Amino acid sequence: MNLKQLSELLGLSQTTVSRALNGYPEVNEATRERVLRAVQETGYRPNKAAQRLATGKAGSIGLVMPSAPGHYSDVHFGEFLTGLGEEAVRHDFHFVIMPADPDDEVGALRRLAISGNVDALFVAYMRGHDPRLPLLKSLSMPFLVHGRSFGTEPDYPYLDIDNEGAFYDATRLLLQLGHTRFGLLNGPDHLDFAIRRRNGVVSALAERGLTLPEACISHMSMTDEHGQFAMERFLQLPERPTAILCSSTVLALGAIRAVTQAGLKLGEDISLIAHDDVLPHLKPENFSVPLTTTRSSLRAAGVRIAQRLIGTVKQDGPFPEQELWKTELIVRASTGAAPREDQNFGGV
Amino acid sequence: MNLKQLSELLGLSQTTVSRALNGYPEVNEATRERVLRAVQETGYRPNKAAQRLATGKAGSIGLVMPSAPGHYSDVHFGEFLTGLGEEAVRHDFHFVIMPADPDDEVGALRRLAISGNVDALFVAYMRGHDPRLPLLKSLSMPFLVHGRSFGTEPDYPYLDIDNEGAFYDATRLLLQLGHTRFGLLNGPDHLDFAIRRRNGVVSALAERGLTLPEACISHMSMTDEHGQFAMERFLQLPERPTAILCSSTVLALGAIRAVTQAGLKLGEDISLIAHDDVLPHLKPENFSVPLTTTRSSLRAAGVRIAQRLIGTVKQDGPFPEQELWKTELIVRASTGAAPREDQNFGGV
DNA sequence: GTTGGTTGTCAAAGCGCTTTGGAATTTCGG
DNA sequence: CCGAAATTCCAAAGCGCTTTGACAACCAAC
């Protein structure tokens, strides 16, 4: 069943049927309903390829999937993708995913752009001075960045969360609770979010004249294993931190294992705040000691990004070019007053 | 630059240029080279949408990505996807990925099929009596299954590894080493591969008149955490197993943590064989005690599946409908002779 | 009763490619 | 040197949709 057949069946022209289907105003409501009913009955579906050819729109957005290990960890990526997908399905859009070595992100992105298969691009895992940005700007294809690129003029469309603010606030809370020795379990140090989160911590500490020693910062890809390992190292420091900031609940999972195995109590001996991407299988309230978190849903970000990107392609706009989402700081049981010094050392 | 302009530039007809580009034999070699050179110089790229419309081929294969947690674990999926992608890029194919709740796999698959965006389908994470199979068969669209569906007549195209054989062989090796008490750390019990692996173990044991008690089987999604947890339970059994079969190196990671923490020695007190999907960041030879494994590369399977699927679409065939890959059994240090009974209990 | 503005519809012209069915040219056996 | 076969190329017809420009038909207004 194609448009021609359908229009013959209805005794209408292809033009009218097409317009009825695409919501143009110049068609009689009665006619439109007749058309719609016929579509129902015949199961007519417009041919995508023909639509693409005629409109020049592919109805798809492209993204590069980092296919190597240790890359912000797959669970986060999958969760984000789910959000994107949810929204895309609603608009009958789809994505084209190009898996690529992180070494060849730029090349993969370029190939995707010129493939003619997509009409918008999405990029994530931004780094400082990200080399994809100049490419994207030169491409004359709509794009949207998840995150930002530290060190590049923010003159591109992005959606980001306020990573610096989140970790600044979290640090301030811990300072108010009397903590003075901090540790930071962070994502890979080349990634933008990790840079900003560290800055947030550092600047909150600086306000109290405190610093964050190198030994108390750990950058790693965000798996629970790494979290455990890094936390173990922190605990062996002569002046071990009592307050931990953690870039992901996944990292926190490992870190808490280390804390427990060292015979320490979370929320008493060690306070911990983790960033919560709202991963459905890792709820901070379900931890044996519920976690204090900074929260921002990764899936919601995916939905929003799909919305903006699809809107841009369909010229539904205008959308704000740049969005910076605030995070929530949610206090649960993993944070408490700093242990008194004598108590702290008396236990050893 | 489109075909018409290019052909005018060359003083040839569109037909000839098109044929030169698509490798048809009825064009003079000299002409073909002239065309190819012009393509280089002008940077001409055929319009995908027009090709799709004219040929009826979308140049893409569709797949449903399980977007919920606990689903065979993302690392395996990512690794497989990389293989698919590698090969797809080579043929200028791409995938369309539809994220979907595992509850709605069938619906998602159907939507993908009728979307008109793909000309072949790929499915994985097969279950016993998988409901997607009837749908696929009714769809008159090429498809390929990774794995099989226990309980369904194998009259569909698939690529699978010999899961049963792999675990049968592994079990036999452990039997030969004198082990009599076995444990199985397996994937989710509704998944086909898990069913077959269990069968492999059970039938090898049966040959010696042994059985695998329910308490010594653990089905779970394959994360290291689950592996650790399940192994801890095994170790608390009154007659704890000395030989462990493990469906993934990821599970093994956790299991070994449990073994070590119990003060036991891998390869002495406990022997373990894991299935190795050749995940690049989890090499069995790099474990502190190198792992004995059954090996089959997930990425290679991805490459092969893409090859077959693309070949089918392009009618490059014929390909074998069904492939069953043998696994390799590679002995390293995690397997050893069964501990003597007195030794075993004397240590406690 | 003519003019002018809506409204609802249509025929036809693309969009950029592939492919069919010839037609022109060359090659070659007899 | 001729007719048939092989080689090389082309014009034109789609593929199924969107969109332009025009045209009836209808209404209100002067």
Image (cartoon, coloured by chain):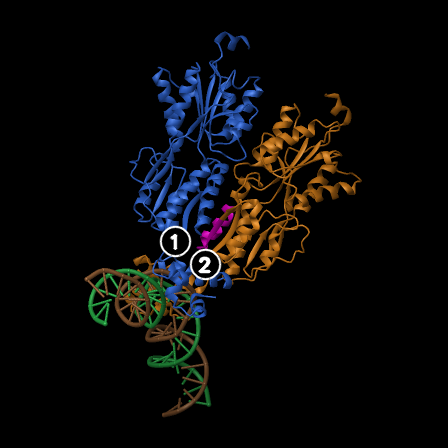
Chain colours: A orange, B blue, C brown, D green
At label 1, the amino acid type is Ser
| Horizontal side of residue A18 vs B299, given as left or right | left
Residue B142 location in percent, x, y? 34, 47
At 55% from the left edge and 59% from the top edge, which residue is drawn? A142
* Membership of A156 in magenta stretch: no
Q: Residues within 10 Å of mark 1 (few under 14, many from 20)?
A: some
Magenta stretch, residue numbers: A81-97
> Which image quadrant: the C terminus of chain B?
top right
- Label 2 chain ID: A
Examine the rendering and report whether any part of residue B28 can be seen: yes
Q: In this view, does A132 lie above or below B66?
A: below
- Label 1 chain ID: B
| Horizontal side of residue B230 vs B113, given as left or right | right
Examine the rendering and report whether any part of residue A290 can be seen: no
Give the SS element for disc 2.
Answer: loop
Q: Is residue B204 above or below residue B136?
A: above
Give the SS element for disc 1.
Answer: loop
Q: How crowded is mark 2: few (under 14 residues within 10 Å), some or many (20 or more)?
A: many
The residue closer to the viewer here, B16 or B141, is B16
Residue B308 location in percent, x, y? 37, 44
Gap in angstroms between the C-alphas marked 2 and 1? 13 Å
Residue under label 2: A58
Q: Nearer the viewer, mark 2 or mark 1?
A: 2
| Horizontal side of residue A296 vs B325, given as left or right | right
Question: Residue B195 falls in which quadrant of the image?
Answer: top left
Residue B297 location in percent, x, y? 45, 35
**Marks 1 and 2: in contact by CB < 8 Å?**
no
At 57% from the left edge and 24% from the top edge, which residue is drawn? B288
Query: Do badges 2 and 1 share one subunit?
Result: no
At label 2, the amino acid type is Ala
Residue under label 1: B115
